[in-house]
Amino acid sequence: MAPRLAYLGLGAMGQAMTKNLILNGKLEHRLILWNRTLQVALDHSARIGHSVVAETVEEAVQGADIIWSCFASQEAVSERFETILQRDVKGKLFVESSTISADATNKLAERVIAAGAEFVAMPVFGEPSMAQRALLTCLPCGREESVQRVLPYTKGVVGRAVVDLSGQKPGTASTLKLVGNTLIVGMIENVAEAHVLAEKAGVEAKCLHQVIENVWPGPYAIYSSRMSSGEYYKDKPIVNVEMAKHVASHVLALAEETGTSLSSYKVAVDHIDDVEKHAGEAGDISGIYGAIRKKSGLPFER
């Protein structure tokens, strides 16, 4: 019998992933949706079809065999699972895609498994526009038999690639995601610096963007486009500053714990702080470009 799926958390990533679960996942049963703000879930369900909205997280979990979650912070993960684990969850499989610390992931996995359920940590790489196009890279991690139950919903459904971490402690996936974050933030910092340098040196932004599109396509081009078009302050954030700082706190804690120097990452985090001062917590991570512009004698807004 086909499993019943529920998805908890309908931010930009959750909305993109649930859309693709329905489009590409060949779900026999309607997808159960839950979000803290009910109206968000109702509106999203109306857009994507083949879904039903649960009014409470308990209702969503009890109606599903596989429960996939993606929340904005470690605190949100803790709060939701505190509620979830008060009920009988025996036999259910939890797939957790939030960006949290390895220690938090391992402790959560232990609690879920002790309650008679299965647990797979599966953070993903790719920002929301890539998630919309099912171009995520998935990092499933946990007991091999549990990961095998998740794989049918990864490549070709919500993502384009899988880094299979079967058999490793679930926190390994969280660590890999945090390590990858240093590359993402470094990329944004580098693209921003290049655009500011080009402008100050008299090179048109569209020319540099064309170079980036052709030589470094993908994420580099996505962020270059946001900077050169002004979307970094005009448009809805890809990743808001509040979330960026939340993830950065885990990265820096990991660096301190392991005795690793992350000097360039810290420079970028300082620029994220500058974005928050200028635009508030809803500012976009690509606003790093605006912060560097200000430090270079240009206006924040392009």
Image: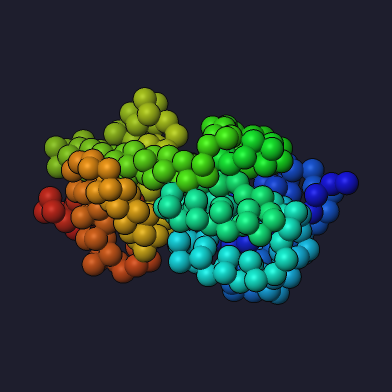
In the displayed image of the protein, which residue is found farthest to the top? 215
Residue most extreme to the left: 297
Colour scheme shown: rainbow
Q: Residue at x 36, y 59 (%)?
A: 246
Camera-nearest residue between 294 and 26: 26
Residue ranking furthest to the right: 1
Residue drawn 53% across and 57% down? 108
Nearest the eye: 156 or 164? 164
The x and y percentages for residue 118 are 66, 50
| Point 53% across, 37% down: residue | 168
Q: Position of residue 267 (x, y in %)?
A: 19, 48
Residue 15 showing in the rendered view: no
Query: Looking at the rendering, in which quadrant would you find the C terminus?
Result: bottom left
**Numbered marks: total:** 0
Q: Is residue 2 above or below residue 56?
A: above
Residue beneath the point at 88% across and 46% down: 1
**Residue 246 appears in the rendering:** yes
In the rendering, at what x and y percent does residue 110 appear? 56, 54
Is 300 or 121 nearer to us in this picture?
121
Image-based side of 18 in relation to 225, left or right: right
Q: Is residue 269 left or right of residue 178?
A: left
Task: Give the image location of residue 54, x and y in percent.
Answer: 73, 70
Q: Is residue 154 above or below residue 57?
A: above
Depth order, front residue of 203/261: 261
